[in-house]
């Protein structure tokens, strides 16, 4: 018969105790009575919670992610957006959206925004061709001066030396 190991002792089918030895074959692996219970608990958990998890964190066909009713496509800071949309989905679980998708897709380095034509409405970043003009701080300061709009903003200077000279004695 098979051999069972109990507290370091081997007991054979006839009930004779002896020294535990490693065996091979069909009866060599021992199974804890807890293993089937853990398996059943896992199956019950998955059956109960998996549909809700998939509903909350479902993956849209194609490129967009979805958390609750919110769809989004991001290529930078994804974990921050996931947390933000998770928070929104908790506050507004029944939000009535009709296919909108929010994007935060930076095209730096030649990345191309995927086709979003399947979505009836896209909320996108302002194009890099527009924002590059404002990212150049010196060019922006000169543009404000040239248009006479610099009074609405803190004074700008072209260099540290110019700032020190202009504010000397203040």
Image (cartoon, rainbow, N blue to C red):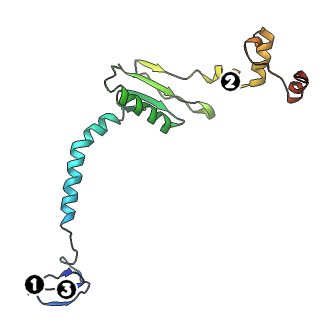
Placement of the C terminus among the 4 image quadrants: top right
Residue 155 versus residue 38 in the image, above or below: above
Q: Position of residue 14 (x, y in %)?
A: 8, 87
Label 3 CA crowd tier, 10 Å (few <14, some 14–19, many 20+):
some
Q: Residue furthest top?
A: 148
Apparent side of residue 126 relative to residue 96 in the rendered image (left or right)? right
Left or right: 102, with 139 as reference point:
left
Q: Secondary structure at mark 1?
A: loop
Q: Which residue is mark 1?
A: 13
Q: Which residue is mark 2?
A: 132
Task: Classify residue 53 by image quadrant.
Answer: top left
Query: In this view of the protein, can residue 5 be seen by the observer?
Result: yes
Residue drawn 85% across and 29% down? 160
Q: Is residue 52 above or below residue 100?
A: below
Residue 58 on image: x %, y %: 34, 35
SS label for mark 3: strand
Label 1 vs label 3: CA separation? 10 Å
The secondary structure type at the circle numbered 2 is helix
Q: Earlier in the sequence, mark 2 or mark 1?
A: 1
Q: Which residue is mark 3?
A: 10
Q: Image point 46% across, 25% down: which residue? A: 102
What is the x, y in percent for residue 54? Answer: 30, 38
């Amino acid at each position: 018969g098979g051999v069972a190991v109990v507290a370091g002792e081997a007991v054979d089918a006839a009930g004779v105790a002896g020294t535990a030895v490693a065996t091979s074959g069909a009866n060599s692996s021992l199974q804890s009575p807890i293993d089937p219970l853990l398996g059943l608990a896992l199956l019950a958990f998955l059956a109960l919670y998996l549909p809700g998890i998939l509903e909350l964190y479902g993956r849209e066909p194609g490129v967009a992610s979805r958390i609750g009713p919110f769809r989004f496509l991001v290529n930078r800071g994804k974990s921050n957006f996931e947390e933000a949309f998770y928070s929104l989905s908790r506050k507004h679980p029944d939000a009535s959206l009709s296919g909108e998708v929010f994007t935060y897709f930076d095209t730096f380095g030649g990345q191309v925004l995927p086709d979003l034509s399947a979505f009836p409405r896209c909320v996108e970043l302002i194009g890099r061709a527009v924002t590059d003009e404002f990212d150049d701080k010196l060019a922006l300061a000169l543009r404000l001066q040239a248009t006479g709009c610099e009074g609405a903003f803190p004074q700008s200077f072209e260099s540290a030396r110019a700032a020190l000279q202009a504010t000397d004695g203040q």
